[in-house]
Image (tube, rainbow, N blue to C red):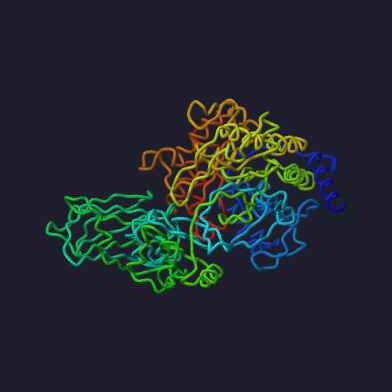
Amino acid sequence: MRSRAAFALVALMLAWASGTAAAPTTQRPRRLPSPVKMLWLDNEADPASWASRDAVAALLDKARDAGFNVVVPDTKNMLGYVFYDSEVASRPLTWKGKPYPADFDLLRVVIEEAHARGLQVHAGLNLFAEGGKGPHGRIGPVYSHPDWESVVYDRLATIRLGDSVSTFAATVNDRGTAGFSVLTRSYGARVCAADSPACLADGVIGKQASRWVSANTTATHSVRFQWTEPVRLSRLDLHFARGFPVCDLDAACDGTTVAILRGNSLTSVSLPLENAPATGARCLEIVILNPGADHIARIEEARILESGSGRNVAPDAIVTATSTMGRTRALFAVVENDRITTPLQHESDLPDTGLSIPLNGAVIAAEDPAAAAWLGTISDTTPVTITAEKVLLPESQHPGGSLVYVNPVHPEVQSRNLAIIGEILSRYEVDGVILDRGRYDNIKTDFSDLSRRRFERDMGLRVNRWPEDIYIPANPLTEESMTTGPLFDRWVLWRAKVIRDFFEQARAVVRRHPGRIFGAYVGGWYPVYWEVGVNWAHESYDPRRDFAWAPKGYRATGYAQWLDYLSPGLYYPVVRKGAGAPDTDTVEGGIELAQRVTAHSVKLVPGLYVPNLNSDEVFEEAVRACIQRASGVMVFSQTSLDSLNRWEAARRGLEAVPVHLE
């Protein structure tokens, strides 16, 4: 039974959401600048670092001097906390162990200082993420309201001891950062220590385990492949860390340069070794040049092809490097025929050749001290089975991810967020609001009883087999793909309708405050964004013309027509089309796609994630492309501009002018 305080809070939320708590303020009309030069002020990395008026003023001085004209303070962050004086939501008392000043109203100070500098302020509001887990710890308002929490439908690798004790693996065929990782032969024949350069030749591309160089490595460094007998080499294929392609490198065979790479922005490259010795080489050395503080100069995987046969000879080599990332914390167990077959091994003790993964078993990696302690209790005689089991779990209990999302269809979740929007617009002189994470976490949510009832009611149907009539989850151990059920298309349509209906309500709240600007921040990868229940297209665009996944009626779930502007995140390392990446995976291509699906009906302010653009020059080019081809640019965030020293590059890029008149 709910307490009186809980009922009072619900009543207050409804009052703010409906506009009855305070009369709409009379505001001067506000218009988006043209072009928009927006800076998102991250309030998640270290909120305490700018929790004073002096710190805010200094930050806004930098923003103004760089040429930004709009700032977006994280006003409700991804853990559900707010940074203003609220009757609806709570502010954090501490953040990552640091105290946060209880009397500091960040939003009010940002508004006062920004307006004094001629900058607009749009309050950034994370909607449906309301808590943290994993590295964040179990924090956030969701833990006080467990009925809000999303329920995940998944099939998880389950490690079971005997007949009773069990735990879920956080990752399968990848190295996680906490909990348990399960590695089968689908991962590869062996697993190497994470700081071993042998990871470069383990056949694993894009995996955590291949990250052998620290993000803090900024000096020139190299990796060397040595063979006992000469090998005739023809080509070098390199795969770099996602979003962080190595810009410049040299490759040499037995001291003779055979390949040069300069100004690269691609995640994968293929380099012919045209001057490799015809009689073969015993050594191939790759030297990464001057990576600088804005690079993670790291090769995920190298394939070195033999002349004639085309065979990859990298696994045959002894691999050494001049730098490592120093991550050797895991405890490993080899499981075969339902038993641990070798003594437990610490990652720091693994041989350079790594640990073999059995054909009819797996390697379990305990990635943190708590997991290692659990693994250490297993005796040689204890049966250990690894199976894939279908589960329905509250998201806080699911081993994946670090955030806890709430159910977007829950009436109290909607009322809370609408109340926060209304409260801010009534009490603060913000120029606008921009909604972030207005979505489901992923395709696996939400499968609560509430969602089932609402799905059946709204769509006029009955689910006979829940949730199998929606889909059968993928099997992480066999790599069997997800199988859709007879109601899958209806489910996709319904989820998108839930989000659309919420945005219609949010627009109504904003329109009760004339002159305020209404925006949304979304992922720019529209072809797969249906997986999180969002159709950010204009209602006139019919995705069935272009995409086979779109169900009948999906067109009506678009909501771009209700926005003053849309900020699609274009987190691509390549700016221009025709530069080696697929057109849709470039900033230019992303802008064109967004313009098409929104029917050129809404101002587009593409979002750039600074670390994904691997040099000052590429970042500047991306900023210019957004201003020239769209209605402006949004840069995320000040913390990245600081850490990568990109303020001057931002200033140069923001000097661009549109190539068309709006």
In front of the other: 613 or 478? 478
Give residue 311's position: percent from left, percent from top. Answer: 23, 53
Looking at the picture, does residue 477 appear above or below residue 542?
below
Looking at the picture, how far across and down is residue 286, in whole percent?
A: 29, 61
- For the C terminus, the quadrant is top right
Q: What residue is at 24 percent from the left and 58 percent from the top?
A: 313
Q: Is residue 111 left or right of residue 631?
A: right
- Is 579 drawn above or below residue 133 in the view shown? above
- How far across and how far down the image is residue 230, in percent? 16, 63
Q: Indicate the quadrant where residue 557 lies.
A: top right
| Residue depicted at x 63% and y 63% | 137
Q: Residue sitting at 56 percent across and 55 percent down?
A: 400
Please give the count of numbered marks on the rendered protein: 0
Asked whether, in this view, residue 287 is left or right of residue 349, the answer is left
Q: Is residue 326 visible?
A: yes
User: 591 and 356: which one is in front?
Assistant: 356
Name of the residue lying farthest toward the right: 4
Residue 304: quarter of image: bottom left
Tell me, yes or no, if residue 124 can be seen here.
no
Q: Position of residue 609 (x, y in %)?
A: 52, 50
Instruction: In this rendered view, identify the residue nearer to me: 206 or 64.
Output: 206
